[in-house]
Image (tube, helix red, strand yellow):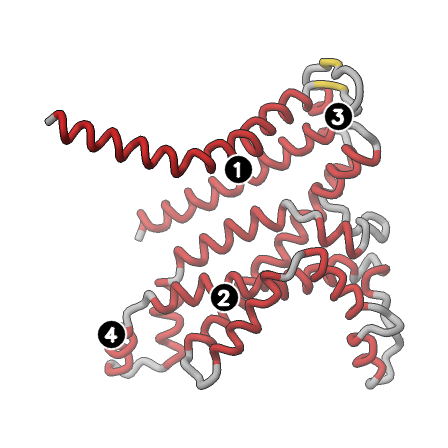
Amino acid sequence: MSGAGSLKRRIAVTALIFIAPVLIYNLIFKIVPIFVSLFLSLTKFSGFGEARFIGLANYARIFGDSEFWRAVLVTFQFSIEVLPLNMLFSLLLALLVNSGLKGIGIFRAIYYLPVITPMVAASMIWIWLYDPQIGILNFLLSLFNIPPVNFLRNPNTALHSIVAMRIWRGAGWNMLIYLAGLQGISKNLYEAAAIDGASSIRRFFKITLPLLRPVHVYVLIVGMISTLQSFTEMYVMTGGGPLQSTTTVGLLIYRAAFDYMDMGYASAMSFVLGIMIMTLSVASFRSRRQKEAFE
C-alpha cells in the first residue's frame, strides 16, 4: 500500500510540475488583474499618484452615462449582425469542405488563412478594400456607374462594413468546428434516411442540423463573448466614428483609461461589461439544458 501511495504522490507531483507554469501564468496575468481592476473600480485613479477610494460612485456614474449605453447598443448591434451571418457562412463552408470534392483541401487552407491573420493586419486590408479612391469594392461599383462610397466614413455603412470584415476573418475557425461536428455524425444515419426516401434537403434539416445543436451553442457562446469585447477592428478601421456609430464598450473603456486617464471609471465599465457577458453566457447554457431536458 505504501508503494502504491508513494507512486500516486509522485504522479501528482509530476502533474503539478507540468501544470504549474499555466497556473502561475493565469494567476499573475488573469486572476490578480481581476482583483486589481475591481479595487480600481472603487477608486478615483489617473494612473499616477494615489488612488482615492470613492465607493460605488463609478458604477452610479455608469447608469447615468448616455455615452456608455449608446456604446452598449452599438456593441450588441455588432454582435447580433456578426453571429448569425458568421454561423451560416461557416456552416456552408464546412458542408462544402465535408463534401469530399477533389482538391477541397487546398480551399480548406485558404478559408482558414484569415484566422491566422492578425486583427490589425486584417483591418488594414479591409481599409484598402473600402477606400473610395483605390479600393476594389468601389472599383467594382464604378463598373455599374455607381459613384464611390466612403464605407468607413458614413454612419449608415461604417458598422456594417466592419461586420463584413469580422465575418470574413472568423468564418475559417468556425468552419473547422462545424467540420468536426459534421464528421462526427454517423454515415449510417444518412444511409438509412436515404433508403427511406428522404431527400438531401430533408436529411439536412432532420439529421444534420439537430445533431449539430451542441456545436451551434458552442459557436454562438464563444462568438458572443468575442464580439461583445470587440475593440481592435473599431480602433483601427474607424476610431469609433463617424459620429460614434462604431464606438463599442471596449473602445469606450480604452478611451476612458488612456485618453482621459480615468482608470477607475474604465475598470468599472469593464466589470459591467463582464457581468453582461457572463449573464448572457449562463443564460445560453441554461436554455440549452432546458431544451435538452424537454426533449
What amino acid is labelled 3 in the image? Arg
Point out the tag, 3 or 4, that comes first from the N-terminus: 3
Which residue is located at x 69 percent, y 32 percent?
A: 269
> Total number of numbered labels?
4
Image quarter for residue 179?
A: bottom left
Front-lying residue, 217 or 8: 8
What amino acid is labelled 2 in the image? Met
- Disc 1 to disc 4, how far (Cα)? 39 Å
What amino acid is labelled 1 in the image? Thr
Point out the tag, 4 or 2, that comes first from the N-terminus: 2
Point out the tag, 2 or 3, that comes first from the N-terminus: 3
Q: Nearer the viewer, mark 3 or mark 4?
A: 4
The disc placed on residue 188 is 4
Point out the tag, 1 or 2, that comes first from the N-terminus: 2
The disc placed on residue 61 is 3
Which residue is located at x 62 percent, y 50 percent?
A: 227
- Disc 4 to disc 2, how far (Cα)? 23 Å
Q: Nearer the viewer, mark 4 or mark 2?
A: 2
Marks 3 and 4: CB-CB under 8 Å? no
Q: Secondary structure at mark 4?
A: helix
> x and y percent of residue 138 in the render?
82, 75
Which residue is located at x 62 percent, y 24 percent?
A: 36
- Disc 3 to disc 1, how far (Cα)? 21 Å
Marks 1 and 2: CB-CB under 8 Å? no
| Label 2 Cα neighbours within 10 Å, binned few <14 / some 14-19 / many ≥20 | many
**Left or right placement of residue 208 versus residue 261 in this view:** left
> x and y percent of residue 60 in the render?
71, 23
Query: Mark 2 sits on what residue?
Result: 175
Q: Nearer the viewer, mark 1 or mark 2?
A: 2
Query: Mark 1 sits on what residue?
Result: 279
Q: Nearer the viewer, mark 2 or mark 3?
A: 2
